[in-house]
Amino acid sequence: MNRRWFVHGDDFFESSGYTAMQQLIQSGSLPKAIFAASDLLALGAIRALKEHELRVPEDIAIIGCDDIEACKYTTPRLTTIRQNKERLGILAAHMLYDLINNQSGGGSFVVEPVLIVRESCGSQLKS
């Protein structure tokens, strides 16, 4: 694992993804694929790659997280991880209720993510 490929942004917005990808490009060493913690970060990364004439997914694959509506309309369309936001919100509310009332909750919860394969990952995820 190459630690130089771990870049942290200031937030989860497009501008941070752009800045982080600029840092990776300037390092001179790029991975074959990027996982961004949000779709907006991924979209910023794609913008930086295009400015440097790097192609997604031919030169580098990108996957985001959130499945925002814009993913369907970008070029290339963004591969992403979809999470059930309603279920996450309900679980968070129950956990908060338990904390406020000094009750022991059910421990940890798992909300199954769904991989939405679109164009930005190329053939890397297709089997």
Image (cartoon, helix red, strand yellow):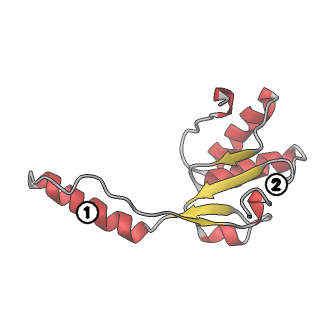
From this viewpoint, which residue is outermost toward the front? 127
- The amino acid on which the numbered mark 1 sits, given as a three-letter code, is Ala
- The amino acid marked with disc number 2 is Val
Image coordinates for residue 72, horizontal then vertical, percent: 69, 72
Image check: 92 left or right of 75? left
Q: In this image, 89 relative to 61: left or right? A: left
Q: Is residue 13 left or right of residue 100?
A: right
Task: State the residue in front, 20 or 29.
Answer: 29
Label 2, secondary structure: give it: loop
Of residues 22 and 101, the one nearer the viewer is 101
In the figure, 81 relative to 104: above or below?
Answer: below
Which quadrant is the N terminus positioned in? top right
Q: Nearer the viewer, residue 7 or 111?
A: 111
Indicate whether 60 appears above or below 119.
above
Seen as rendered, the residue at the extreme left is 102
Q: Where does residue 96 sit, x and y in percent of width and height?
A: 21, 56
Local packing at callout 1 (Cα closer than 10 Å; few below 14, some 14-19, many 20+) is few
Q: Which residue is mark 1?
A: 93
Which residue appears farthest toward the right when viewing the image? 53
Give me the residue at 45% from left, 64% from top.
112
Helix, strand or loop for disc 1: helix
Toward the viewer: 64 or 73? Answer: 64
Residue name at image x 63 percent, y 50 percent: 41
**What residue do we see at 76% from left, 52% from top?**
61
Q: Quadrant of residue 109 in the image?
A: bottom left
| Pointer 2 local density, CA inside 10 Å: few below 14, some 14–19, many at least 20 | many
Image quadrant where residue 84 sits: bottom left
Which numbered circle lies on residue 108?
Answer: none
Q: CA distance from mark 1 to mark 2?
A: 39 Å
Precedes in sequence: disc 1 or disc 2: 2
The residue identified by callout 2 is: 56
